[in-house]
Image (spheres, grey):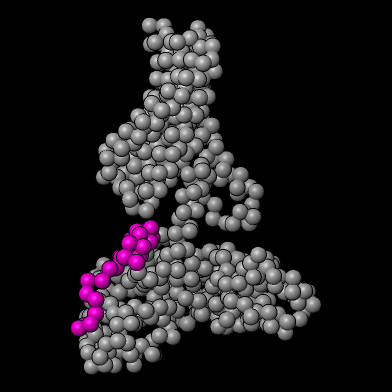
Amino acid sequence: MKVSQLFLPEVMQAIEGGDLESLKAVFDHLHPSDIADLLENLEAEQIAEIMRILRAPRGIDVFEQLEIEVQSRVLDYLGQKEIVNILEDLSPDDRVDLLQTLPEETVDSLLPMMAQAERQEVTRLLQYEEDTAGSVMTTEYAALPDDITVSEALKRLRTIAPESEMIYYIYLLGEGRRLKGTVSLRDLVLAKPNQVLKDIMSRDPIFVEVSTDQEEVARALNKYDLLALPVVDAQQGLVGIITHDDIMDVLVEEQTEDAHMMGAIEPVEEPYFEASIWSLTRKRGVWLFFLFIGQFFTAWALEHYQGTFENALALIFFIPLILSSGGNTGSQSVTLITRAMAIGEVHVKDFFKVVLRESTIGVALGVFLGLVGFTRAALGSSTWHISVTVGLAIIFVVIAGALAGASLPLLFKRLGFDPAIMSGPFVTSVVDVIGIIIYFGMAQFLLFS
Protein backbone atom coordinates (compact mmCIF):
# COMPACT_ATOMS: atom_id res chain seq x y z
CA MET A 1 0.00 0.00 0.00
CA LYS A 2 1.25 3.50 -0.86
CA VAL A 3 2.17 5.80 2.01
CA SER A 4 -0.39 8.30 0.76
CA GLN A 5 -3.19 5.74 1.03
CA LEU A 6 -2.51 5.31 4.75
CA PHE A 7 -3.22 8.99 5.37
CA LEU A 8 -6.21 9.28 3.01
CA PRO A 9 -8.94 8.56 5.63
CA GLU A 10 -7.38 11.09 8.01
CA VAL A 11 -7.18 13.73 5.28
CA MET A 12 -10.77 13.12 4.17
CA GLN A 13 -11.97 13.45 7.74
CA ALA A 14 -10.03 16.71 8.20
CA ILE A 15 -11.47 18.12 4.95
CA GLU A 16 -15.04 17.24 5.90
CA GLY A 17 -14.56 18.79 9.36
CA GLY A 18 -12.71 21.85 8.07
CA ASP A 19 -9.78 21.00 10.34
CA LEU A 20 -6.97 22.92 8.64
CA GLU A 21 -4.45 22.33 11.42
CA SER A 22 -4.77 18.55 11.09
CA LEU A 23 -4.29 18.81 7.34
CA LYS A 24 -1.13 20.85 7.77
CA ALA A 25 0.17 18.37 10.37
CA VAL A 26 -0.34 15.44 7.97
CA PHE A 27 1.28 17.22 5.02
CA ASP A 28 4.29 18.29 7.09
CA HIS A 29 5.31 14.62 7.40
CA LEU A 30 4.84 13.63 3.76
CA HIS A 31 7.05 13.98 0.69
CA PRO A 32 5.57 16.22 -2.06
CA SER A 33 5.21 13.16 -4.34
CA ASP A 34 3.25 11.30 -1.65
CA ILE A 35 1.04 14.33 -1.09
CA ALA A 36 0.38 14.49 -4.85
CA ASP A 37 -0.58 10.79 -4.88
CA LEU A 38 -2.96 11.47 -2.03
CA LEU A 39 -4.51 14.56 -3.64
CA GLU A 40 -5.26 12.73 -6.87
CA ASN A 41 -7.89 10.74 -4.93
CA LEU A 42 -9.78 13.98 -4.24
CA GLU A 43 -12.03 16.22 -6.30
CA ALA A 44 -10.38 19.12 -8.15
CA GLU A 45 -12.19 21.65 -5.96
CA GLN A 46 -10.81 19.99 -2.81
CA ILE A 47 -7.30 19.97 -4.27
CA ALA A 48 -7.61 23.69 -5.01
CA GLU A 49 -8.49 24.38 -1.37
CA ILE A 50 -5.52 22.33 -0.18
CA MET A 51 -3.21 24.20 -2.56
CA ARG A 52 -4.26 27.40 -0.79
CA ILE A 53 -3.35 25.78 2.54
CA LEU A 54 0.06 24.53 1.42
CA ARG A 55 1.19 27.79 -0.21
CA ALA A 56 4.59 28.26 -1.85
CA PRO A 57 7.19 26.84 -2.03
CA ARG A 58 5.87 23.51 -0.71
CA GLY A 59 2.59 23.93 -2.53
CA ILE A 60 4.43 24.38 -5.84
CA ASP A 61 6.53 21.26 -5.18
CA VAL A 62 3.29 19.31 -4.71
CA PHE A 63 1.53 20.90 -7.68
CA GLU A 64 4.41 19.98 -10.01
CA GLN A 65 3.98 16.32 -9.02
CA LEU A 66 0.30 16.21 -10.03
CA GLU A 67 -0.70 14.75 -13.39
CA ILE A 68 -1.03 17.48 -16.00
CA GLU A 69 -4.75 16.72 -16.45
CA VAL A 70 -5.31 17.12 -12.70
CA GLN A 71 -3.38 20.40 -12.69
CA SER A 72 -5.59 21.74 -15.46
CA ARG A 73 -8.81 20.83 -13.63
CA VAL A 74 -7.56 22.38 -10.37
CA LEU A 75 -7.04 25.74 -12.11
CA ASP A 76 -10.79 25.85 -12.80
CA TYR A 77 -11.34 26.42 -9.07
CA LEU A 78 -8.66 29.07 -8.58
CA GLY A 79 -8.81 32.79 -9.25
CA GLN A 80 -6.72 34.38 -11.98
CA LYS A 81 -4.28 35.90 -9.50
CA GLU A 82 -3.81 32.52 -7.80
CA ILE A 83 -3.23 30.86 -11.20
CA VAL A 84 -0.67 33.48 -12.20
CA ASN A 85 1.19 33.03 -8.89
CA ILE A 86 1.38 29.26 -9.53
CA LEU A 87 2.48 29.71 -13.15
CA GLU A 88 5.26 32.14 -12.19
CA ASP A 89 6.61 29.70 -9.58
CA LEU A 90 6.57 26.65 -11.86
CA SER A 91 9.71 25.68 -13.76
CA PRO A 92 9.59 26.97 -17.37
CA ASP A 93 9.00 23.58 -18.99
CA ASP A 94 6.22 22.63 -16.56
CA ARG A 95 4.66 26.08 -17.01
CA VAL A 96 4.50 25.69 -20.78
CA ASP A 97 3.15 22.12 -20.54
CA LEU A 98 0.30 23.35 -18.34
CA LEU A 99 -0.52 26.35 -20.52
CA GLN A 100 -0.76 24.08 -23.57
CA THR A 101 -3.65 22.22 -21.91
CA LEU A 102 -5.66 25.42 -21.37
CA PRO A 103 -8.02 27.07 -23.89
CA GLU A 104 -6.33 29.69 -26.05
CA GLU A 105 -8.53 32.48 -24.70
CA THR A 106 -7.57 31.55 -21.12
CA VAL A 107 -3.88 31.68 -21.97
CA ASP A 108 -4.36 35.06 -23.66
CA SER A 109 -5.99 36.43 -20.51
CA LEU A 110 -3.29 35.06 -18.18
CA LEU A 111 -0.14 36.07 -20.05
CA PRO A 112 -0.55 39.87 -19.58
CA MET A 113 -0.84 39.30 -15.81
CA MET A 114 2.50 37.50 -15.60
CA ALA A 115 5.84 39.19 -14.97
CA GLN A 116 7.52 40.32 -18.17
CA ALA A 117 10.45 37.89 -17.89
CA GLU A 118 8.17 34.86 -17.43
CA ARG A 119 5.81 36.09 -20.16
CA GLN A 120 8.63 36.43 -22.68
CA GLU A 121 9.98 33.02 -21.71
CA VAL A 122 6.57 31.38 -22.21
CA THR A 123 6.16 33.04 -25.60
CA ARG A 124 9.58 31.80 -26.69
CA LEU A 125 9.08 28.23 -25.50
CA LEU A 126 5.61 27.98 -27.07
CA GLN A 127 7.11 28.60 -30.51
CA TYR A 128 8.94 25.26 -30.54
CA GLU A 129 7.23 22.34 -32.22
CA GLU A 130 5.63 19.71 -30.01
CA ASP A 131 7.72 16.60 -29.22
CA THR A 132 11.02 18.39 -29.92
CA ALA A 133 13.88 19.20 -27.56
CA GLY A 134 12.80 22.84 -27.50
CA SER A 135 9.33 21.92 -26.25
CA VAL A 136 10.58 19.92 -23.24
CA MET A 137 13.65 21.91 -22.20
CA THR A 138 13.94 24.25 -19.22
CA THR A 139 15.71 27.58 -19.31
CA GLU A 140 16.76 27.42 -15.65
CA TYR A 141 20.37 26.25 -15.87
CA ALA A 142 23.77 27.24 -14.54
CA ALA A 143 25.95 28.96 -17.14
CA LEU A 144 29.17 30.92 -16.71
CA PRO A 145 31.79 32.58 -18.97
CA ASP A 146 34.70 30.28 -19.78
CA ASP A 147 37.38 32.88 -18.96
CA ILE A 148 36.82 33.34 -15.22
CA THR A 149 38.66 31.61 -12.38
CA VAL A 150 37.34 28.75 -10.28
CA SER A 151 37.13 31.07 -7.27
CA GLU A 152 35.00 33.58 -9.18
CA ALA A 153 32.88 30.76 -10.62
CA LEU A 154 32.01 29.41 -7.15
CA LYS A 155 31.10 32.91 -6.02
CA ARG A 156 28.76 33.45 -8.99
CA LEU A 157 27.34 29.95 -8.66
CA ARG A 158 26.08 30.72 -5.15
CA THR A 159 24.04 33.52 -6.68
CA ILE A 160 22.55 31.66 -9.67
CA ALA A 161 22.09 28.23 -8.03
CA PRO A 162 18.69 29.01 -6.41
CA GLU A 163 17.24 29.81 -9.86
CA SER A 164 18.79 26.76 -11.56
CA GLU A 165 17.00 23.44 -11.91
CA MET A 166 20.32 21.59 -11.84
CA ILE A 167 23.83 22.73 -10.92
CA TYR A 168 25.70 19.43 -11.21
CA TYR A 169 26.73 20.56 -14.71
CA ILE A 170 27.88 24.13 -15.31
CA TYR A 171 27.80 25.19 -18.96
CA LEU A 172 30.62 27.42 -20.12
CA LEU A 173 29.81 30.02 -22.73
CA GLY A 174 31.87 32.04 -25.15
CA GLU A 175 30.93 35.00 -27.31
CA GLY A 176 27.26 35.04 -28.38
CA ARG A 177 26.43 32.47 -25.67
CA ARG A 178 28.04 29.77 -27.79
CA LEU A 179 28.47 26.56 -25.84
CA LYS A 180 32.21 25.99 -25.41
CA GLY A 181 32.29 23.23 -22.81
CA THR A 182 31.05 21.94 -19.46
CA VAL A 183 32.48 21.48 -16.02
CA SER A 184 30.93 19.37 -13.29
CA LEU A 185 30.38 20.69 -9.81
CA ARG A 186 32.74 17.99 -8.54
CA ASP A 187 35.55 19.18 -10.84
CA LEU A 188 34.89 22.76 -9.82
CA VAL A 189 35.18 21.97 -6.11
CA LEU A 190 38.38 19.95 -6.59
CA ALA A 191 40.11 22.49 -8.86
CA LYS A 192 42.57 25.10 -7.63
CA PRO A 193 40.93 28.51 -6.95
CA ASN A 194 43.14 30.39 -9.44
CA GLN A 195 42.59 28.01 -12.36
CA VAL A 196 40.62 29.37 -15.34
CA LEU A 197 37.49 27.44 -16.27
CA LYS A 198 38.53 26.95 -19.90
CA ASP A 199 41.56 25.02 -18.67
CA ILE A 200 39.55 22.46 -16.71
CA MET A 201 36.38 22.20 -18.80
CA SER A 202 35.34 19.23 -20.90
CA ARG A 203 35.47 20.36 -24.50
CA ASP A 204 33.18 19.23 -27.33
CA PRO A 205 30.18 18.67 -25.05
CA ILE A 206 27.31 16.43 -26.09
CA PHE A 207 24.30 18.58 -27.05
CA VAL A 208 21.08 18.52 -29.07
CA GLU A 209 19.42 21.18 -31.20
CA VAL A 210 16.01 22.66 -30.40
CA SER A 211 14.45 20.77 -33.34
CA THR A 212 15.77 17.34 -32.26
CA ASP A 213 13.00 14.80 -31.67
CA GLN A 214 12.45 14.09 -27.98
CA GLU A 215 13.01 10.37 -28.51
CA GLU A 216 16.48 11.12 -29.91
CA VAL A 217 17.12 13.24 -26.81
CA ALA A 218 16.18 10.30 -24.59
CA ARG A 219 18.53 8.01 -26.47
CA ALA A 220 21.39 10.51 -26.16
CA LEU A 221 20.88 10.89 -22.39
CA ASN A 222 20.86 7.12 -22.01
CA LYS A 223 23.82 6.50 -24.35
CA TYR A 224 26.13 9.03 -22.70
CA ASP A 225 24.79 8.41 -19.17
CA LEU A 226 24.10 12.09 -18.51
CA LEU A 227 21.89 13.77 -15.93
CA ALA A 228 21.15 16.68 -18.26
CA LEU A 229 21.69 17.60 -21.89
CA PRO A 230 22.26 21.14 -23.23
CA VAL A 231 20.01 22.41 -26.02
CA VAL A 232 21.39 24.85 -28.60
CA ASP A 233 19.89 26.93 -31.40
CA ALA A 234 20.99 27.11 -35.04
CA GLN A 235 23.92 29.36 -34.09
CA GLN A 236 25.10 26.89 -31.41
CA GLY A 237 23.98 29.27 -28.68
CA LEU A 238 22.82 27.65 -25.45
CA VAL A 239 19.06 28.13 -24.97
CA GLY A 240 18.17 25.49 -22.37
CA ILE A 241 18.77 22.06 -20.87
CA ILE A 242 16.78 18.85 -20.65
CA THR A 243 17.07 16.99 -17.36
CA HIS A 244 16.81 13.24 -16.89
CA ASP A 245 13.57 13.47 -14.88
CA ASP A 246 11.84 15.43 -17.64
CA ILE A 247 12.93 12.97 -20.29
CA MET A 248 11.67 10.09 -18.14
CA ASP A 249 8.20 11.62 -18.40
CA VAL A 250 8.67 11.80 -22.16
CA LEU A 251 9.72 8.15 -22.34
CA VAL A 252 6.67 7.02 -20.36
CA GLU A 253 4.46 9.06 -22.67
CA GLU A 254 6.10 7.70 -25.83
CA GLN A 255 6.06 4.09 -24.64
CA THR A 256 2.40 4.39 -23.63
CA GLU A 257 1.57 5.78 -27.06
CA ASP A 258 3.49 3.00 -28.82
CA ALA A 259 1.86 0.33 -26.64
CA HIS A 260 -1.59 1.67 -27.50
CA MET A 261 -0.83 1.82 -31.22
CA MET A 262 0.66 -1.68 -31.25
CA GLY A 263 -2.54 -2.88 -29.61
CA ALA A 264 -4.53 -1.24 -32.43
CA ILE A 265 -5.82 1.60 -30.24
CA GLU A 266 -5.59 5.29 -31.04
CA PRO A 267 -3.34 6.74 -28.27
CA VAL A 268 -5.26 7.62 -25.11
CA GLU A 269 -3.78 10.63 -23.31
CA GLU A 270 -5.98 10.54 -20.20
CA PRO A 271 -5.65 7.97 -17.40
CA TYR A 272 -7.92 4.96 -18.04
CA PHE A 273 -10.58 5.80 -15.43
CA GLU A 274 -10.59 9.49 -16.36
CA ALA A 275 -11.12 8.88 -20.09
CA SER A 276 -14.79 8.96 -21.08
CA ILE A 277 -16.54 5.82 -22.32
CA TRP A 278 -17.22 7.60 -25.62
CA SER A 279 -13.56 8.56 -26.03
CA LEU A 280 -12.32 5.01 -25.42
CA THR A 281 -15.00 3.57 -27.69
CA ARG A 282 -14.11 5.95 -30.51
CA LYS A 283 -10.34 5.42 -30.20
CA ARG A 284 -10.73 1.65 -30.25
CA GLY A 285 -13.58 1.57 -32.76
CA VAL A 286 -11.69 3.37 -35.52
CA TRP A 287 -8.94 0.76 -35.56
CA LEU A 288 -11.37 -2.13 -35.18
CA PHE A 289 -13.25 -0.81 -38.21
CA PHE A 290 -10.13 -0.89 -40.39
CA LEU A 291 -9.17 -4.31 -39.08
CA PHE A 292 -12.72 -5.49 -39.78
CA ILE A 293 -12.46 -4.18 -43.34
CA GLY A 294 -9.15 -6.02 -43.63
CA GLN A 295 -10.88 -9.27 -42.79
CA PHE A 296 -13.07 -8.77 -45.87
CA PHE A 297 -10.01 -9.72 -47.90
CA THR A 298 -9.69 -12.92 -45.88
CA ALA A 299 -13.34 -13.71 -46.63
CA TRP A 300 -12.71 -12.91 -50.29
CA ALA A 301 -9.76 -15.29 -50.39
CA LEU A 302 -11.82 -18.07 -48.82
CA GLU A 303 -14.62 -17.45 -51.31
CA HIS A 304 -12.13 -17.52 -54.17
CA TYR A 305 -10.91 -20.98 -53.11
CA GLN A 306 -14.36 -22.31 -52.25
CA GLY A 307 -14.16 -24.98 -54.92
CA THR A 308 -10.86 -26.23 -53.53
CA PHE A 309 -12.07 -26.96 -50.01
CA GLU A 310 -15.41 -28.30 -51.31
CA ASN A 311 -13.39 -31.02 -53.04
CA ALA A 312 -11.29 -31.64 -49.93
CA LEU A 313 -13.32 -30.72 -46.84
CA ALA A 314 -10.52 -31.87 -44.52
CA LEU A 315 -8.62 -28.71 -45.52
CA ILE A 316 -11.12 -26.58 -43.54
CA PHE A 317 -10.12 -28.14 -40.22
CA PHE A 318 -6.56 -26.81 -40.51
CA ILE A 319 -7.39 -23.19 -41.44
CA PRO A 320 -7.13 -21.94 -37.79
CA LEU A 321 -3.80 -23.76 -37.43
CA ILE A 322 -2.40 -22.16 -40.58
CA LEU A 323 -3.61 -18.63 -39.79
CA SER A 324 -2.55 -18.63 -36.14
CA SER A 325 0.95 -19.85 -37.05
CA GLY A 326 1.50 -16.97 -39.46
CA GLY A 327 -0.28 -14.34 -37.36
CA ASN A 328 1.58 -15.19 -34.16
CA THR A 329 4.92 -15.19 -35.96
CA GLY A 330 4.12 -11.82 -37.53
CA SER A 331 3.15 -10.37 -34.13
CA GLN A 332 6.45 -11.54 -32.65
CA SER A 333 8.47 -10.00 -35.47
CA VAL A 334 6.64 -6.66 -35.46
CA THR A 335 7.07 -6.39 -31.67
CA LEU A 336 10.80 -7.14 -31.83
CA ILE A 337 11.53 -4.81 -34.75
CA THR A 338 9.35 -1.91 -33.57
CA ARG A 339 10.95 -2.02 -30.13
CA ALA A 340 14.45 -2.28 -31.61
CA MET A 341 13.71 0.76 -33.76
CA ALA A 342 12.39 2.70 -30.76
CA ILE A 343 15.62 2.26 -28.80
CA GLY A 344 17.88 2.83 -31.80
CA GLU A 345 19.08 -0.75 -32.34
CA VAL A 346 17.56 -1.02 -35.84
CA HIS A 347 17.37 1.69 -38.53
CA VAL A 348 15.74 1.96 -41.96
CA LYS A 349 19.16 1.42 -43.58
CA ASP A 350 19.20 -2.05 -41.98
CA PHE A 351 16.17 -3.15 -44.04
CA PHE A 352 17.87 -5.91 -46.06
CA LYS A 353 19.86 -7.10 -43.08
CA VAL A 354 16.66 -7.41 -41.04
CA VAL A 355 14.83 -9.17 -43.89
CA LEU A 356 17.67 -11.70 -44.27
CA ARG A 357 17.79 -12.31 -40.53
CA GLU A 358 14.01 -12.73 -40.18
CA SER A 359 13.92 -14.97 -43.26
CA THR A 360 16.42 -17.30 -41.62
CA ILE A 361 14.48 -17.30 -38.35
CA GLY A 362 11.23 -17.76 -40.29
CA VAL A 363 12.60 -20.83 -42.07
CA ALA A 364 13.76 -22.39 -38.80
CA LEU A 365 10.44 -21.71 -37.06
CA GLY A 366 8.46 -22.73 -40.13
CA VAL A 367 10.21 -26.11 -40.45
CA PHE A 368 9.69 -26.78 -36.74
CA LEU A 369 5.99 -25.86 -36.75
CA GLY A 370 5.50 -27.45 -40.17
CA LEU A 371 6.69 -30.80 -38.84
CA VAL A 372 4.32 -30.47 -35.90
CA GLY A 373 1.45 -29.60 -38.24
CA PHE A 374 2.30 -32.47 -40.61
CA THR A 375 2.36 -34.91 -37.68
CA ARG A 376 -0.98 -33.65 -36.39
CA ALA A 377 -2.59 -34.04 -39.82
CA ALA A 378 -1.01 -37.47 -40.41
CA LEU A 379 -2.17 -38.81 -37.05
CA GLY A 380 -5.72 -37.72 -37.84
CA SER A 381 -7.91 -38.98 -40.62
CA SER A 382 -6.22 -36.85 -43.27
CA THR A 383 -4.64 -38.33 -46.37
CA TRP A 384 -0.92 -38.19 -46.95
CA HIS A 385 -1.36 -35.47 -49.55
CA ILE A 386 -3.32 -33.24 -47.17
CA SER A 387 -0.73 -33.80 -44.41
CA VAL A 388 2.05 -32.66 -46.78
CA THR A 389 -0.07 -29.67 -47.86
CA VAL A 390 -0.60 -28.61 -44.23
CA GLY A 391 3.07 -29.02 -43.33
CA LEU A 392 4.40 -27.09 -46.35
CA ALA A 393 1.76 -24.36 -46.01
CA ILE A 394 2.75 -23.75 -42.39
CA ILE A 395 6.40 -23.41 -43.39
CA PHE A 396 5.68 -20.75 -46.01
CA VAL A 397 3.03 -18.94 -43.96
CA VAL A 398 5.39 -18.65 -40.98
CA ILE A 399 8.12 -17.26 -43.25
CA ALA A 400 5.61 -14.79 -44.71
CA GLY A 401 4.53 -13.75 -41.20
CA ALA A 402 8.12 -13.15 -40.09
CA LEU A 403 8.88 -11.09 -43.20
CA ALA A 404 5.67 -9.04 -42.97
CA GLY A 405 6.18 -8.30 -39.28
CA ALA A 406 9.78 -7.23 -39.83
CA SER A 407 9.49 -5.27 -43.08
CA LEU A 408 6.25 -3.31 -42.64
CA PRO A 409 7.46 -1.17 -39.67
CA LEU A 410 10.65 -0.32 -41.58
CA LEU A 411 8.69 0.56 -44.71
CA PHE A 412 6.34 2.80 -42.74
CA LYS A 413 9.29 4.52 -41.10
CA ARG A 414 10.82 5.09 -44.54
CA LEU A 415 7.55 6.70 -45.67
CA GLY A 416 7.61 9.04 -42.66
CA PHE A 417 4.97 7.30 -40.53
CA ASP A 418 5.24 6.05 -36.97
CA PRO A 419 6.32 2.37 -37.21
CA ALA A 420 4.15 1.59 -34.17
CA ILE A 421 1.13 1.90 -36.52
CA MET A 422 2.13 -1.55 -37.72
CA SER A 423 0.36 -3.13 -34.76
CA GLY A 424 0.20 -6.85 -34.07
CA PRO A 425 -3.51 -7.00 -35.04
CA PHE A 426 -2.81 -5.15 -38.31
CA VAL A 427 0.03 -7.49 -39.26
CA THR A 428 -2.11 -10.48 -38.28
CA SER A 429 -4.85 -9.31 -40.66
CA VAL A 430 -2.34 -8.97 -43.49
CA VAL A 431 -0.83 -12.40 -42.80
CA ASP A 432 -4.30 -13.98 -42.63
CA VAL A 433 -4.94 -13.05 -46.26
CA ILE A 434 -1.48 -14.21 -47.31
CA GLY A 435 -1.96 -17.43 -45.35
CA ILE A 436 -5.24 -18.31 -47.08
CA ILE A 437 -3.70 -17.67 -50.49
CA ILE A 438 -0.63 -19.80 -49.69
CA TYR A 439 -2.63 -22.63 -48.11
CA PHE A 440 -5.25 -23.10 -50.80
CA GLY A 441 -2.87 -22.23 -53.61
CA MET A 442 -0.62 -25.05 -52.42
CA ALA A 443 -3.62 -27.34 -52.02
CA GLN A 444 -4.66 -26.72 -55.62
CA PHE A 445 -1.15 -27.46 -56.80
CA LEU A 446 -0.57 -30.63 -54.74
CA LEU A 447 -4.04 -32.12 -54.68
CA PHE A 448 -5.70 -31.17 -57.97
CA SER A 449 -2.95 -30.43 -60.46
Q: Where residue 423 appears, x then y in whole percent?
A: 46, 41
Q: Where residue 194 appears, x then y in whole percent?
A: 23, 93
Examine the rendered structure and indicate whether residue 189 appears above or below residue 223. below
Q: Residue at the spot x=29%, y=92% of the render?
A: 152
* Magenta segment: 198-225
Q: Residue at the spot x=43%, y=83% of the render?
A: 163
Is residue 71 among what the camera can see?
no
Q: Where residue 428 appears, x then y in whole percent?
A: 47, 33
Left or right of 133, for residue 67:
right
Q: Residue at the spot x=59%, y=57% of the render?
A: 271
Examine the rendered structure and indicate whether residue 276 appears above or below residue 211. above
Examine the rendered structure and indicate whether residue 180 appears above or below residue 278. below
Indicate yes or no whether the magenta region holds residue 371. no
Left or right of 303, for residue 15:
right
State the residue in front, 299 or 98: 299
State the residue in front, 213 or 31: 31
Is residue 371 among what the camera can see?
yes
